[in-house]
Image (spheres, coloured by chain):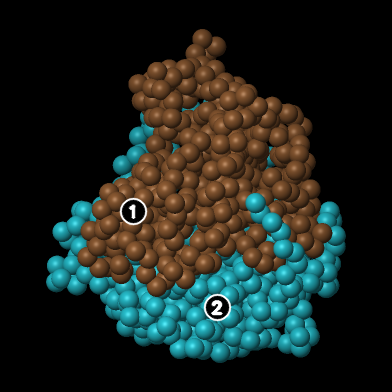
Chain colours: A cyan, B brown
Amino acid sequence: MSRVVVDPVSRIEGHLRIEAQVEDGVVREAWSSSTMFRGIEIILKGRDPRDAWAFAQRICGVCTTVHAITSIRAVENAIGAVPPPNAELVRNLVMSAQLVQDHVIHFYHLHALDWVDIVAALSADPQKTSALAESISDWPRTSPRYFASVKARLEALAQSGRLGPFANAYWGHPAYRLPPEANLMAVAHYLEALDWQREFIKIHAILGGKNPHPQSFLVGGMAVPIDPNEQASLNVGSLEQVRKLIQGARQLVSQVYIPDVLAVAPFYADWAGHGASAGHYLAYGEYPRTPEPDAPRVLPGGVIRKRDLANVEPVDTDKITEFVTHSWYDYEGGDGEGRHPTRGETAPNYTGPAPPYEHLNVEGKYSWLKSPRYDGLPMEVGPLARMLVAYAKGQPRVKALVDHVLGALGVGPAALHSTLGRIAARAIETQVVVEEMESWVDGLMANMGAGDLRICDNSKWDPSTWPEECSGAGFHEAPRGALGHWVHIRNGQIANYQCIVPSTWNAGPRDAGQQPGPYEQAIVGTPVADPEQPLEILRTVHSFDPCMACGVHVLDARGRPLAQVRAL
Amino acid sequence: MSDPKRGWLEVELEHRGVSRREFLGFCGTMAAALSLPATLAARIAEAVEKAPKPTLVWLEFQDCAGNTESFLRASRPTVADVILDAVSVDYHETIMAAAGHQAEQSLAEAMQRDHGKYIVVIEGSIPTGANGAYCTIGGRSALAIAREACAGAAATVAIGTCAAFGGLPAAAPNPTGALSVADAVPDVKNLVNLSACPANGENLVALLVHYLTFGRLPELDALRRPLFAYGKLIHDACEKRGHYDAGQYAEAWGDEGHRRGYCLYKMGCKGPVTHQNCPNLGWNGGTNWPVGCGHPCIGCAEPSFWDRMTPFYRHLPEIPGLGPHASLDKLGLTAVGAVGGAFAAHTALHVARRSADRRRRESGGGEES
């Protein structure tokens, strides 16, 4: 029996630590801990609710946009602002661009190195790599000369003796199974995707001024004006630029990302049998098809219990509670209770070992994450949850793509509840969303043509138009899953602010009933060939796409300010 | 295999299909970005080629990884890649392949092997509350890691407003006792603050090029920010400045003035009190910038902007020396009392600090060694 500690878990956003008990080469028990805390909700208290999006946005710079969108939705819900159709269309474009870019980056830059052995790529034959690439896709960059140049670049790095970010990794680990040519092809696509993401995200610069942290969000709409006859507004020229970037993304996703997933998956087919969480899934739904608040969504919302795809329940957000039994916080009512976010409390109280430490006390409190539960159950959120809900509800495009992928891999829907299932679901979702994007450009064009230039509901901009006291909630499907913000406003100021974030759902610790969180559950049963090199644990943890800065942010009304520190 | 007759850079360029002409063009652009005469482009090229590959370690503490993402978005891809490859990034949690103790080993090795020579980039503030337990990596506190890493570094870059000035975690009431690098590591040497939320990746590239070219840091302002990127007010280089001078303002979101690109002063723009090269450099390959897109500047490159620049949509009061503008409306008058005092004080202090700094530079004492 040995205790494996992975800290830092790298290739993620934020600070995550995994402790796992390994026996006979298999993980028997695991604990997920987030080791960083900032306290953004207490900082939000007393502020202007129209500013909240900018604060909340900084919860995360990888999932930049997601907290901004959710925040403005929560405040709009509270004060009764109704964004005009153009604002909803721009938001759909901003959100979808975020998701598409984030999923591609995750696959190539954060996850691929768990499956792709860069050093093994050095023995690849460029000619054979070219043949492989041409056999799986119409993507144009497949010449032997191209792959030879990528290989030469790798060789130069290897011969320099300075591997930089690729040093000290698990190269040569027996769990790497790709042939050298597939490794080389993947390295080439790693580099191409790095170039592509820089270009594609210009959509955020056009619609939001910059990325990371685009800056055109407004309570009631968006700050990017639209006018076919103005150079300083979104016009036909800038929207066609957006369209072109979308088309490039569509090509990359369908000709590189999807074929790569299908090409790599058969070598790791056994990972369709590892990494399942408890089988409960939650999705709020996203991308409204029309501007009405209850409009149908491109990706529907729903709750699945115990993998039962035949009975998808509607989401009832009143059933959400958070526990702090194993989290470094106190509840007034003690560690046994679960609290709804509208009654949320977050009094931080660190009771872990003083740093530097070797191990956390996992019998007691061991994480800065709380444990959210839905009707008492730990829920997995994210692309897999969304694709399962959409598949079960018969969303036609999702159904067709999921069936296509399952058919290509020769497996049934049960294989989706796994590490590999998460990877496949993320790729399928990217394809579904990128295919929708142009319709939103078309919508903006049509409105502009019809003379509808409204971009913000200005009727609720002035706080004197708001009720003295009001509450609201905003929901969003971020790349990593279901995201909710709850805001309470009093006299034009934020009285309370709470977020329940995808990585809190997925990475949270055990609850009062000792039910493990999804990461903790998913790692159990993972084979570990060498406890010194726990590559297999990383595979499953990374399949969730952890984002710890998002997960830990909480501190609210009962938070104790610890220090007033001058910062210049 | 490297050819001893050719610099590593030439070999790298060839692998990437970048011509020498393109590279020199890039050096010219860098010269311009660094506010240097174009004749220095050749010197930049020569220096970058000859410079040994320095080690860079990137530490993330109370961060959101926004600066990391910004760094990955640095444009002019092929050539900028070369420059970034000119630096060996030995530790960066978000991109490195190794995890756990193998990752920690990379950091330890780099700090030992290149003691006194490596560059450390710090992203995120450093918490001092709860004995450091608000941010630990590998069981060690951010504060302990930062102090160790800075002590052995040739230079420290605090990237983003959190590392540079405390940023969001340090905003009132600073629940975790978050500090900037300068405050958390008082004896830090050769510190450069690349503030903004996030910092523009292009400015980091320019800073590294400067360092490789001249072997020393660029000139800094009183807040230790490079003058090449923070030497001017946004307001002074703003594309909407003509509208400001002409008294043409956007008055409501989506109104005619907003659509025509009129000045955003009345919508709360903080460009008049913010130093940063956004209007010149642009974001994402010069595609756009926040004010260009229609939203006011929020002043993110300045210290305590989360407290001093908020509410973001309340416009600045009249500040001496900022030129003519329309009479203050109801909101503006309330602002004079609260934010106005702070700004006037800030501006005055800033001017004083800058002139002191200039005097120090002129007397040769402007840069730490």
In the image: residue B346, left or right of residue B20: right
Which residue occupies 77% across, 79% down? A330
The answer, for residue A404, to whether it is visible in the render is no
Spatial CA distance of label 1 from label 2 is 35 Å
**Residue A20 appears left or right of B329:** right
Indicate the chain on which mark 2 is placed.
Answer: A
Q: In x, y percent, where is residue A317? A: 53, 86
Q: Amino acid at mark 1?
A: Pro
A2 in relation to A146, above or below: below
**Quick one: A559 or A354, which is closer to the camera?**
A559
- Which residue position holds label 2? A494
Which of the 4 image quarters holds residue B20? top left
Front position in the image: A124 or B102: B102
Q: Residues within 10 Å of mark 1 (few under 14, many from 20)?
A: few
Residue B319, position in %: x, y?
45, 55
- Above/below status of A185 relative to B268: above
Say which residue appears at 66% left-offset and 79% top-offset: A557
**Residue in front for this viewpoint, B99 or A336:** A336
Question: Helix, strand or loop at disc 2?
Answer: strand
Residue at figure coordinates x 51%, y 36% from the top left: B227
Which of the 4 image quarters holds residue B208?
top right
Question: What residue is disc 1 on?
Answer: B324
Residue A134's mark? none
Residue at the location (40% across, 29% down)?
Answer: B32
Q: Quadrant of the N terminus of chain A?
A: bottom right
Q: Which chain letter matches label 1?
A: B
The residue carrying pointer 2 sits among few (fewer than 14), some (14 to 19) or many (20 or more) residues within 10 Å by Cα, namely many
